[in-house]
């Protein structure tokens, strides 16, 4: 029964399953994990299936499965709500956020790890302290500063906020610590500037951590609501999440909003399905010392 599954290490190994009590525990754990998966996936499946229902069916027939599966209903909702525009706005925010998150946070992490200027330990301590401050408490002063700079109504503040992420800086620093200092010193002896060392040597060696930061940034930027709502509302640059909130005052029905929610969760699902392997590899490599 277990010949096709050979496991020589880990919490439960193949030969452990020969013991009756271990086998019982193993199947209990499988059952618990299966229930957790079902609980996590049930709301997503319900939202997708509800999008196939008509308004009358959605209101008067509280069933899990729809009577028919007509993809044309989703197409019609996409056209009525002009979702292409908001998807494009969200993609612009995501692309800019990725650039700033990787470059700005990466440069600061490199400086703290390899250059170590005077006061770098104080800066690192302040960055660590900032992780203890709830992000919502900084929204008001951040918004006031953005207004004073005249940047409201543009995507730039959203991009720059992704480039000032303390968590990303710590991840980059820990990863760069694993790169031998001898590589950096050799490049300096050859006459490379710090900019050249970062972009031509360190950056190409940071594929795994860059992948992790990119995936985190895509998910955070796509799902962000509060700051885009404060900056982009009534500008024609609303993102998908902002527009979902504004649909409550539009001609959209409850089923149209359900379909719009389905459109909003498709990119994160696709992202996780295709890149979960790289997320695990990248996270596992953080903190490993070479």
Image: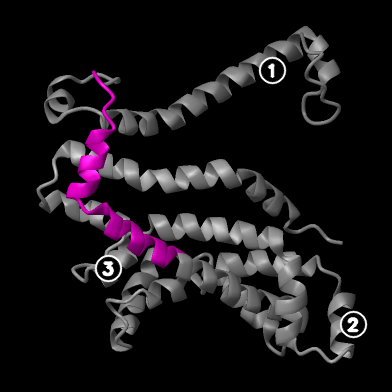
Q: Position of residue 167 (x, y in %)?
A: 57, 64
Residue 213 seen in the figure: yes
- At 30% from the left edge and 88% from the top edge, which residue is drawn? 148
- At 66% from the left edge and 74% from the top edge, which residue is drawn? 109
Residue of label 3: 237
Q: Nearer the viewer, residue 30 or 75?
A: 75
Q: Position of residue 58 (x, y in %)?
A: 18, 27
Identify the mark nearer the N-term, 1 or 2.
Answer: 1
Bin the neighbour count of mark 1 within 10 Å (Cα to Cα): few under 14, some 14-19, many 20 and up: some
Left or right position of 123 against 131: right
Relative height, residue 189 to residue 13 (above, below): below
Identify the mark nearer the N-term, 3 or 2.
Answer: 2
Q: Nearer the viewer, mark 1 or mark 2?
A: 2
Q: Nearer the viewer, mark 3 or mark 2?
A: 3
Q: Quadrant of residue 222?
A: bottom left
Residue of label 2: 186
Write down the region rendered in magenta. Answer: 67-94
Q: Nearer the viewer, residue 178 or 63?
A: 63
Q: Position of residue 122 (x, y in %)?
A: 65, 82
Left or right position of 276 against 22: left
Quick one: SS at disc 3? loop
Q: Nearer the viewer, mark 3 or mark 1?
A: 3
For the residues labelled 1 and 2, the Cα–Cα distance comes to 52 Å
- At 53% from the left edge and 44% from the top edge, which residue is drawn? 272
Relative height, residue 202 to residue 188 (above, below): above
Residue of label 1: 26
Residue 173 on the magenta segment: no
Bin the neighbour count of mark 2 within 10 Å (Cα to Cα): few under 14, some 14-19, many 20 and up: few
Quick one: SS at disc 2? helix
């Amino acid at each position: 029964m277990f010949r096709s599954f050979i496991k020589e290490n880990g919490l439960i190994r193949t030969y452990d399953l020969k013991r009756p009590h271990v086998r019982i525990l193993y199947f209990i754990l499988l059952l618990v994990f299966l229930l957790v998966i079902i609980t996590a996936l049930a709301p997503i499946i319900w939202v997708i299936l509800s999008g196939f229902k008509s308004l009358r069916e959605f209101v008067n027939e509280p069933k899990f499965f729809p009577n028919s599966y007509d993809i044309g209903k989703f197409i019609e909702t996409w056209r009525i709500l002009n979702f292409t525009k908001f998807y494009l706005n969200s993609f612009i925010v995501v692309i800019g956020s990725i650039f700033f998150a990787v470059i700005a946070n990466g440069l600061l992490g490199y400086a703290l790890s390899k250059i170590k200027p005077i006061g770098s330990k104080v800066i690192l301590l302040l960055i660590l302290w900032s992780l203890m401050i709830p992000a919502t408490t900084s929204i008001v002063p951040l918004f006031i500063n953005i207004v004073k700079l005249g940047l409201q109504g543009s995507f730039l503040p959203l991009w720059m906020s992704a480039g000032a992420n303390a968590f990303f800086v710590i991840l980059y620093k820990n990863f760069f610590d694993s790169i031998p200092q001898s590589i950096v010193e050799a490049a300096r002896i050859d006459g490379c500037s710090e900019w050249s060392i970062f972009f031509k040597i360190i950056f190409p060696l940071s594929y795994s951590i860059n992948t992790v930061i990119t995936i985190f940034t895509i998910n955070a930027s796509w799902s962000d609501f509060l700051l885009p709502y404060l900056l982009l509302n009534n500008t024609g640059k609303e993102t998908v999440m902002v527009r979902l909130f504004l649909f409550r005052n539009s001609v959209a029905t409850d089923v149209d909003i359900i379909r719009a929610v389905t459109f909003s969760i498709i990119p994160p699902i696709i992202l996780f399905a295709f890149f979960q392997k790289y997320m695990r590899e990248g996270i596992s490599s953080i903190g490993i010392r070479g």
